[in-house]
Structure formats: C-alpha cells, structure tokens
Image (cartoon, rainbow, N blue to C red):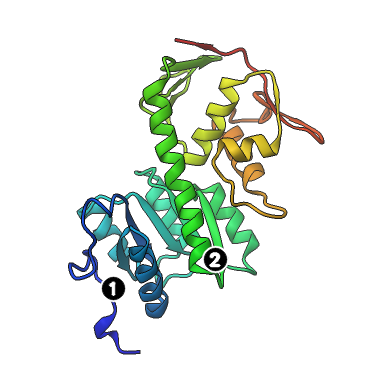
Amino acid sequence: MNHSGDPDIVKSDPGNRLTEASAEHHVLLVDDDAELRQLVAKFLRANGLRVTTVRSAPETRHALSSIPIDLIILDLMLPGTSGLDLCREIRRTSMIPIIMLTAKADEADRIVGLEIGADDYVTKPFSPRELLARLNAVLRRIAVDTGARNRTAVREYQFQGWILDTLKRELTNPEGILVDLSTGEYDLLLAFVEQPQKVLSREHLLDAARNRIATGFDRSIDVQISRLRRKIAPGDDDHAMIKTVRGAGYMFLPTVTWS
C-alpha cells in the first residue's frame, strides 16, 4: 500500500482536520495496520470527530503528552508493547476512556482488558458504524455525567468511611487515599450509592453505565463489578459491599449518606 496518503502521524493531519465547531471530540486511534487506520480515521472524521492516528506505544505516549485527547481506540496487538500493557500503563496516570480492538478468539484478553481499565471493546473484523456507535455511547456518557454533576445538589456520598466526590469524580478510601476508577467503574459505583440496599438488575446497571450497545452474553458488567469489589473491599471479604442476588442482579449493602 502506498503510505504517502496514510495519515499516521503523531500530530493531527492539518489537511484532514475539521473545524473546532464540528470537531468537538478528539480521538486517538492506535493500530499498526496502516489500511485500517486510514479507513477508520476517514470514517470518524466524516462523522464529526477529530482523529489522530499512531502505530505504536512510543507514538501513543508522545501524542498523549502533546495534545488533549478525549478517547483512545487501542488495538490489542501492537508491535513491542502490547495493547494490554499500554492500557495498563495509561491507567496509571489517566482516566481517558479506552475502547479496545480485539480478535474474536481473544475472549480472555478482552476480559483482562476490562479488568485493567478498558471501558469497552470491539471485535475484529468490525464495521466502522459499530465502532462509531460504541464510541458515541462513551462520549454521551461523559456528557450526561457532566450535565448530571452540574444539575445535582449532591456533591459527596459517604459509606463506611469512603467518600465519592461527584464533582471531582474521585473516590477516597477511609485512609484518605484516592482510589483510581475507570469511567465504567465510576458509573457503576454512582448507580449503587444512589440506590443503596436495593437490588439493581444487570439491565439497569448496563443503562447506568451507558453501555446500551451490548448484545448477547456480555460479561462486561460482571467484570467491572468484580474489579470494583476488589478496589472498595480488598482482602478476603470481596463481597462485603456489593452482594450478588442470584437471578436478579446486585445490591449495594452499606448505608449511604450524602451532602
């Protein structure tokens, strides 16, 4: 393939850049397949998104340190540092939403990706329309969360010494230490503290996490709840706060107060 027309540059291609008015969100597409990068970037730009494309972990690091990014589309299979390792690395310092691209046979890797902080995944081969739908779902969730924080009078939820700050989107443990949450984990915890001691179905939690695209048997909610349990109740008693109600869903057990 002739790479002279390939937009894989660390900085956005000025010739393809949309105006600020129509390019509100900036997406970083990380994939070593030049043809896929070019086709997906073209499709996303045609649908009102700014897109920067990169091929590897070093280029990803450079892009993230150089330009503001709203969402990352990250391929699982990258040369050198893998997509999983790169996702783990990004999560140490950033909560930028991440959608992972995986092969259909890589179910275990998809689950690991969700466990280390990816917000969603799309399996290859995929249609650009499906990717756009999932991407828009994540961006809508961010917009809804921002609007909700602006409207609500509740700033903090407290439970068993923990504090969830809805303005800063921060969770503090009883020792005063910040606990990192992915966007999906934050959405789930907020849904629980808003309705404590009430059984919430998986469908309700999918809606609360804005994951309306999920079809068939999707373990994303179970995986994110498992990860959330480990973060808010480390140790032997992983189920102290979130109880599984067989055949019904999940229940948040602590008493919750707010201010």
Task: Kindly identify which residue carries mark 1.
Answer: 8
Pick whichever of labels 1 and 2 is earlier in the sequence.
Answer: 1
Residue 240, given in percent of the width and then of the height, sits at 67, 24
Residue 58, given in percent of the width and then of the height, sits at 29, 64
Residue 82, given in percent of the width and then of the height, sits at 45, 65
Residue type highlighted by circle 2: Thr
Position above or below: 79 against 224: below
Q: Residue furthest bottom?
A: 1
Position above or below: 138 against 172: below
Residue 169 or residue 203, whichever sits in front? 203
Q: Residues within 10 Å of mark 2 (few under 14, many from 20)?
A: many
Task: Kindly identify which residue carries mark 2.
Answer: 102
Q: Is residue 32 left or right of residue 219?
A: left
Position above or below: 148 against 184: above
Q: Residue furthest left?
A: 14
Residue 8 or residue 141, whichever sits in front? 141
Position above or below: 96 against 237: below
The secondary structure type at the circle numbered 1 is loop
The secondary structure type at the circle numbered 2 is strand
Residue 227 seen in the current view? yes
Distance from label 1 to label 2 (Cα)?
20 Å
Q: Residue at x 44, y 52 (%)?
A: 98
- Quarter of the view holding residue 64: bottom left
Residue 57, given in percent of the width and then of the height, sits at 34, 64
Residue 232 seen in the current view? no
Residue type highlighted by circle 1: Asp
